[in-house]
Image (cartoon, grey):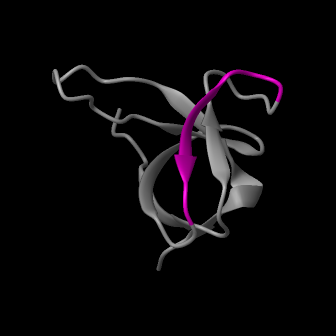
Amino acid sequence: MADSKKKAIVKKNDVFSYARPSKNAIKVNQFKKDDEITVYPLIKGWFELRPVDTDGIMNTEFIAESEIKFLK
């Protein structure tokens, strides 16, 4: 099954990704307006991010759909 990843940009400053798909979860990363990110569909209203850290380990974090805008 192929991943259906999409390119998106962050709509405003001080947007956070979270450790689980909830704004009550631990904040993982902070983004600025117009940061470009790659997201993967998860559940309604949330997308998954899969950044790789400096050791080459893939992490999982989540961002609200309302905080991003998809690129064409």
**Residue 57, above or below 53:** above
**Residue 34, above or below 67:** below
Q: Quadrant of residue 48?
A: top right
In the figure, is residue 17 to the left or right of 52? right
- Depth check: give the residue in front, 44 or 65: 65
The number of callouts visible is 0
Q: Position of residue 19 (x, y in %)?
A: 61, 22
Q: Quadrant of residue 56?
A: top left
Q: Position of residue 16 (x, y in %)?
A: 64, 44
Q: Which residues are magenta?
A: 24-32
Quarter in which the N terminus is drawn: top left
| 70 falls in the magenta region | no
Residue under the image location 38 percent in, 23 percent down: 59
**Residue 36, above or below 31:** below
Q: Quadrant of residue 52?
A: top left
Residue under the image location 66 percent in, 22 percent down: 20
In the figure, is residue 28 to the left or right of 3? right
Q: Position of residue 61 (x, y in %)?
A: 53, 29
Residue under the image location 56 percent in, 46 percent down: 30
| 27 falls in the magenta region | yes
